[in-house]
Image (tube, grey):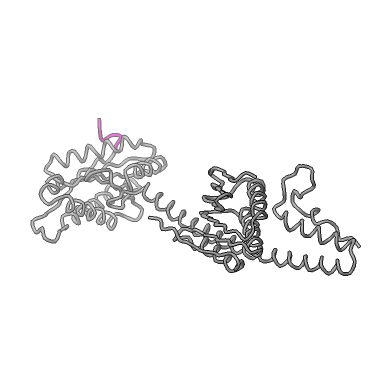
Amino acid sequence: MSIGTPADFADGGRDGRGKPPDLFESEIRALETACQALDNGNHQDHRRALEALIREFDRVIRDMRRLINHADRTERELSRANQRLTELTRGLAYRNRHDGLTGLLNRETLIDEAEALLAVQAMALILMDIDHFKQVNDRYGHPVGDQILRDVAGAMRTLAPEDGLCGRLGGEEFAVILPGQIAGKALGCAGCIADAIRAVRRDGHPGLRVTASFGIALASAGTSFDRLYICADDALYRAKHSGRDRIEVVADCIRGLP
Amino acid sequence: METRLYIPPSPNTPEVDFDFAARRLCIRGESYPESAVGFYHEILQRTRDFLGSLEEGEVQVIIELRYFNSSSTKMLFNLVDELNAAAKLGNQITLDWYHDAEDDTMLEFGQELADDFPEIHFRTLPIETS
């Protein structure tokens, strides 16, 4: 009787020709010894060979059980690590697009979105600047100033139309972009935000009042965003220099400025 | 026989410091070599030779691995098997299994080895990381 040679089944098994030893070298050696004894031996040898095989089989089962347990634990760990990585990536993507203080879109993201929208669709840009904000910070402290910025952002988020996008351009300057060249819609939005800002109050600072100035510009599809931004900024400048706490509009960017 | 086997650590292989003269065998680091069989072959062979020369001796083994892949796991079994065989022959084998205090996977692996090889004096030792 011949039961073959276990090394035949080994991956890169020991064949004496310089191949690296097998991962299961010791088991293969034990099986080879047992197989030879079964092939050549008498009844007593057969019994010893079978006993050796049983011992090896028992050991391999134990090894396999530990190996599989370890692999399972490692897989679970890997799965948890992947989950954490996904959450971190998601968090990083969010932080990359949003302003850390207010949670609104950051400047780069808002401009990217505006450029993409304006390439295919008419658009209104509302620029907004909180009046005398430096004095708020100087008089009430930066923590109060930061809270005012968050209050303003909250008002914008609540009051801007669903199809609008709100962002913080930097400092106390904010913007809303609205699809469509509809002055009434943009004026309505800016007016509601202006009212909400006037209503902002802070506990412990009864004298604190906040207002903002607005510049609105509207443009048809295909207008460059830079052009729209210049128009809105010009309107904002006029609002500031006409006494603040007001809204100025450039209805058509192409004809609105020289 | 050389009295020491030292293999410096690499990004994917552990530091191996087997001081046979002092009867102190240490493996530290991470183990995911391209060929676990190739990497551990000499380690196992030298350990086998060393253990074969022992007569009721005492050996301290320190394993401090943060990560090992499946092939390395099998090679570790082979190493512990050799140690276990030496323990059965009357040698005192102590195996200190260090693991990150936060790493339950490594702790459980060490505990399984301790359960399967009661003749080796196993200690699982947490390492506190700040």
The quadrant the C terminus of chain A occupies is top left
First to last magenta residue range: A253-258
Q: Is residue A40 above or below residue B8?
A: below
* Residue B67 is one of the magenta-drawn residues: no
Residue furthest to the top: A258
Question: What is the magenta segment's predominant secondary structure?
Answer: helix
Query: Looking at the image, which is closer to me, A204 or B55?
Result: B55
Q: Residue A2 occupies which quadrant of the picture?
A: bottom right
The answer to which of A139 and A156 lies nearer the viewer is: A139
At which x and y percent is residue B60?
A: 54, 57
Q: Is residue B60 left or right of residue A122?
A: right
Asked whether A232 or A252 is in front, the reply is A232
- Please report the residue visible at 79 percent of the width from the left and 45 percent of the height from the top: A16
- Left or right? Give the position of B20 relative to B49: left
Instruction: Report the side of B89 relative to A253 (left or right).
Output: right
Task: Find residue A250 and report its image quarter.
Answer: top left
Name the outermost residue toward the left.
A207
- Which residue is nearer to you in this view: B127 or A3? B127
| Above or below, comparing residue A55 to residue B3 in the picture | below
Residue at screen point 64% across, 58% down? B55
Q: Residue at x 22, y 53 (%)?
A: A152
**Quadrant of the rendered structure where residue A67 is?**
bottom right
- Rendered location of residue A68, percent (x, y): 62, 63
Q: Is the N terminus of chain A in the top left, top right, bottom left or bottom right quadrant?
A: bottom right
Above or below B51: residue A247: above
| Residue A256 lies in the magenta-colored region | yes
